[in-house]
Image (tube, rainbow, N blue to C red):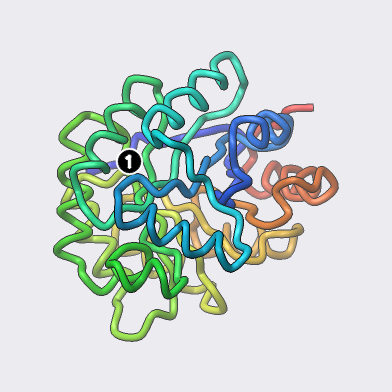
Amino acid sequence: MASTVSFTPPLALASLSGEADADWARAGAEYAGAAFLGGIAIDADSRAAARELVARDRTEFLPDDPLAFIARELESLAGTPIQPAVNVRSATVDPVVDAARVCRDREAYLEINAHCRQAELRDIGCGETLLRDGERLAGYVERAAETDATVGVKVRAEVPGVDLPELARRLETAGAAFVHVDAMDTESIIAAIVDATDLFVIANNGVRDGETVREYVGYGADAVSVGRPSDNPVVLERVRDAVARRLGCETRR
């Protein structure tokens, strides 16, 4: 299906575990058109894995009720000039459907995490593990999209045995509207996905300046996202201005 996803400027703030909350999104709203909150573990197994990650000093969101937390964070962004989205991790499908409904009712995008590569998450069947289980991942997308939420997937390139363009086609058929691609060191994977689908393609990894924006836009990306420096106004302003030059969009000042 043709994607209906759009945000202006076409610069997103990518989720940062334990850091990407509503306050973080508000701080970046001057520069970005969308903000992906999370990632948020939403089922029992992924929450247990997140607790293991915290035990080895990783920052994670672990609210008592993750769906209520998502709802509160999204509601607190009402009136903020940024498109909200939520990145969720789950080893089971039903909580993904529940999160989709929360996002739908608050006009937020739902992003299914098939990206995180920590062993604790892979071992329980979520994050990057989902890339190798395309049937299950497509099932997550299909069930979530049935709620009428705008659904997409965060993916990672360079995972052995995973054909990302083919997987993207499968996700589009299942009802995905966008794909958020961590290109790793294979930036040209963006062009392959753009050629294979009508999905809205967000390019991620190393977006810091005009050169990286130019490369991803040249490969056909509809938008780019900033990860680790998403709390750095100097980087965000530089990328925002580069996006405006390359994609001809207005920027907020």
Relative to 122, say whether 111 is above or below: above
Residue lying at the far top in this picture: please name it. Answer: 79
Asked whether residue 224 appears in the rendered view, the answer is no
Coordinates of residue 53 in the picture (x, y in percent): 51, 64
On the image, the x and y values in percent for residue 54 come to 55, 59
Q: Quadrant of residue 13?
A: top right
For the point 23% across and 52% down, the residue is 172
Q: Identify the image quadrant of the N terminus.
A: top left
- The residue that label 1 is drawn on is 3
Residue at 68% x, 30% y is 29
Seen as rendered, the residue at the extreme bottom is 160
Where residue 77 sits in the image (x, y, percent)?
A: 56, 21
Q: Which amino acid type corresponds to the residue marked 1 in the rendered image? A: Ser
Q: Position of residue 79 (x, y in %)?
A: 58, 14
Report the front residue among 150 and 45. Answer: 45
Q: Which residue is situated farthest in the front direction here?
A: 55
- Looking at the picture, tell me which residue is in the foreground, 38 or 68: 68
Image quarter hosting the C terminus = top right
Relative to 36, is 112 above or below? below
